[in-house]
Amino acid sequence: MRRMLFKYTKFAALPDELIIDILGRVAASSLVDFFNAKLSCKILNQIGEDGYIYQRANLEKIPTANWKPMSHGQKAFLSKCKKYKNPEIMFRKAVVAYFKETDIVSCTVNLNKALKLGHFGAIYFTALVIIFIGEDQLKHKGIELMGKLKRCSNLNEKMP
């Protein structure tokens, strides 16, 4: 369908998978650039709704705790990130649940999801908790995990 609607644009010659990969990389580095790209043309706006992009979106500039109510657009964006299992969303939910000390089950579930997705912060957080709360054998595992994190050259790289 996209090919028929936009047959006179240069984007029509590119495969959707390539555009999705490019937008995913843009969203991973800058949400501002991602949203500007979506606003630039109908094709990028349409393809920019792919779940892969929301999974890779960098949420660094979005505060964990909001001091004012979120707009409908912000809620929709974070909801899509949650739907497509953005590791940062899972990690944030786990940390908030951990420090509230009321919902340890939610903390564990979300932390495990973030760990499975290879989220660096989740691995670091888990290692710290194991070191400070665990028994001697667990502390040793936590220290090993910290050593593996230290050896990772790129923070976005998956753990060995």
Image (cartoon, rainbow, N blue to C red):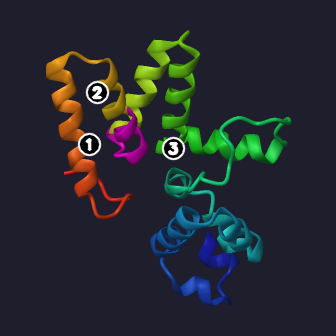
- In the rendered structure, which amino acid carries the disc numbered 3? Glu
**Within the image, what quadrant is residue 7 found in?**
bottom right
Is-magenta flag for residue 120?
yes
Where is mark 1, residue-wise? 146
Note whether 156 is above or below 132 in the view shown. Answer: below
Q: Secondary structure at mark 1?
A: helix
Q: Tell me whether circle 1 and circle 3 mark residues in contact (CB < 8 Å).
A: no
Q: Tell me whether circle 2 and circle 1 mark residues in contact (CB < 8 Å).
A: yes
For the stretch drawn in magenta, what is the main secondary structure? Answer: helix
Front position in the image: 98 or 30: 98
On residue 131, the disc is 2
Residue 67 in picture, x, y percent from top left:
81, 35
Question: Which mark is in front, 2 or 3?
Answer: 2
Question: For the point 29% across and 54% down, which residue is it?
Answer: 158
Question: For the point 39% across and 33% down, which residue is it?
Answer: 113
Q: Which residues are magenta?
A: 116-125
Question: Which mark is in front, 1 or 3?
Answer: 1
**Within the image, what quadrant is residue 4 found in?**
bottom right
Question: For the point 53% across and 87% down, which residue is it?
Answer: 13
Front position in the image: 92 or 109: 92
Neighbor class of circle 3 (other Cα within 10 Å; few <14, some 14-19, many 20+) is many
Neighbor class of circle 2 (other Cα within 10 Å; few <14, some 14-19, many 20+) is many
- CA gap between label 2 and label 1 equals 9 Å
Residue 122 in picture, x, y percent from top left:
40, 38
Question: For the point 46% across and 70% down, which residue is it?
Answer: 17
Where is mark 3, residue-wise? 88
Q: Tell me whether circle 2 and circle 3 mark residues in contact (CB < 8 Å).
A: no
- CA gap between label 1 and label 3 equals 19 Å
- In the rendered structure, which amino acid carries the disc numbered 1? Met
